[in-house]
Amino acid sequence: MGMPQATHGWTAEMVRALPDDGNRYEVVDGELLVTPAPRLLHQRGILTLLEILRDYVRSHRVGELLLSPADIEFDPHTLVQPDIFVAPLVEGRRPRAWTEIKGLLLAAEVLSPSTARADRQVKRRKYQRQGVPEYWIVDLDARLVERWRPADERPEILAQMLSWCPVPAATPLEIDLAAFFRDVVEE
């Protein structure tokens, strides 16, 4: 199968059949999303956020912290690959296959110029409809996080502190965003 020509009418199965050509392919409600390899700063942002989340998610047993590439299929016309996400435990254990992940506790995307529309509009609306409790859009250039919840019509804009307390955690994770952005963006 060559490069995709149309961007609508796609299924998760069709996306899985695309060649491994360095692009990231996702489909949301039949709309094909194609993004090139990310810039270095994007990857540093993902790694730094992953390091912050890792111990918290493990110690509070809230789920499994993972990153893309991934095959999160909400329905036959939706296959997403959030940069970082937390999948719920399955019968008290970590998921063993992508097919066991039916929902997410957290999805986070580190914004890139090539992904801004998909992250802020297409994927955000899908995550809200799926009931993902927290969706974070990390904007490294603006040094802020847009936090979306299922019923939100506008994001909560966070630049200083991000607090996250998923069920069943007893205490929240507090992320000092100013320190996070300094670590990622500044040399």
Image: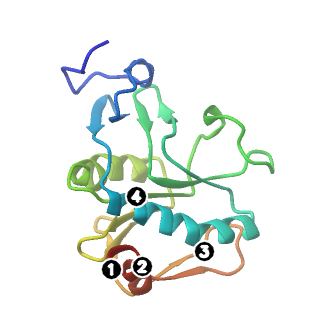
Q: Secondary structure at mark 3?
A: loop
Q: Secondary structure at mark 1?
A: loop
Find out whether the residues at labels 3 and 4 contact each other: C-beta distance under 8 Å: no
Above or below residue 186? Residue 92 is above
Residue 12: image location, x then y, percent: 43, 25
Residue 186: image tag: 1
Q: Amino acid at mark 3?
A: Cys
Q: How many callouts does the rendering have? A: 4
Q: Nearer the viewer, residue 139 or 147?
A: 139
Tell me: 7 left or right of 16. left
Q: Amino acid at mark 1?
A: Glu
Within 10 Å of the Cα at label 1, are there few (<14), some (14-19), or many (20+) other Cα atoms?
A: few
State the CA–CA distance, disc 3 to disc 2. Answer: 23 Å
Residue 43: image tag: 4
State the CA–CA distance, disc 3 to disc 4. Answer: 25 Å
Residue 183: image tag: 2
Above or below residue 13? Residue 167 is below
Above or below residue 187? Residue 45 is above
The N terminus, quarter of image: top left
State the CA–CA distance, disc 3 to disc 1. Answer: 28 Å
Kindly report which numbered mark, 3 or 1, lies closer to the viewer in this rendering: 1
